Amino acid sequence: MPELPEVETVRQILIKSGIINQIIQKVEVYSSKLIKDINEKEFIDLLFGQTIHKLERKGMTGKYFVEESLLTPEQKASISLIFPLGNGQKLIYCDARRFGNFRLQTLADYQQLKPYKDIGIDLLNEPVDAKYLFTHYQKRKIPIKIALLEQDIISGIGNIYASEVLFDTKIHPLKKTHELTYSEVEKIIYSAQSILKEALKLGGTSAFDFINPLAQKGDYQTKLKVYARTKKPCYVCATLIEVKEVNGRSTFFCSQCQKLDLWD
């Protein structure tokens, strides 16, 4: 599940590394399955000699590196694609889970095509309408934790930040979306934007395997209030943090600070 601070950290570091305005000297494909809607030869031929003018983001999986020497043996084994560039650098894409894919689309049309068009509002780059989100939630009856992970409405909240946002807003992860008040939806938006901005400042969260293109870890894991803190005391009330599996994802919360009404 893409976490916005980590993805944006990757984008910013790739830009600072100097790949913008570089010419693609070669295209090395190590996993042809990641190329969609075009055959491998056409993909290579069309990209060869092209210049990288801009780098944007909206959802992402896999890891990007700019120095092959920074990769661990496991990461080297998961290399899916390499773009050697005109300045001697290499833009390296690793994807151990094989979830990612590459598509060639025109600048004029890509926002109206899959997968871009199916990705929801970006919490930091686009305005989020609380009324729209509240109306959407009123039509559904699923736990808010599940709803926050659905990337087609709002994008950028993954499993880590979903737990953190719900703790910050004192909303139980199993509370159904149609039972949220308008005020609670406003709080979710404000909290999510605040937490994601703070996490971005710290280079993301490296609770598990996230590292940036320079093989550096983020620091936001030192700020986590509930995520991965099972049986540790809540920072607010000292109640032991609990964990439940919600739709196959570990969900961390404080049962005292995030009370669930009996009718939920």
Image (spheres, rainbow, N blue to C red):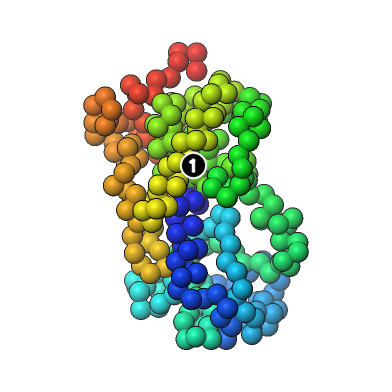
Q: Amino acid at mark 1?
A: Gln
Residue at the spot 24% in from the left edge and 31% down from the top edge: 233
Q: Residue 127: x percent and y percent?
A: 61, 42
Residue at the spot 72% in from the left edge and 66% down from the top edge: 107
Q: Residue 39: name its quadrant.
A: bottom right
Q: Secondary structure at mark 1?
A: helix
Q: Residue 132: name its quadrant.
A: top right
Height in image: 146 above or below 20? above
Q: Residue 169: name its quadrant.
A: top left
- Residue 250 in view, yes or no: yes
For mark 1, does the 10 Å Cα neighbourhood hold few (<14), some (14 to 19), or many (20 or more) residues?
Answer: some
Please give left or right for residue 37 compared with residue 15 in the image: right
Q: Residue 96: x percent and y percent?
A: 45, 64
Q: Residue 164: x percent and y percent?
A: 40, 37
Q: Which residue is mark 1?
A: 193
Height in image: 118 above or below 9? above
Height in image: 121 above or below 212? above
Height in image: 77 above or below 233? below
Q: Residue 223 or 28: which is nearer the viewer?
A: 223
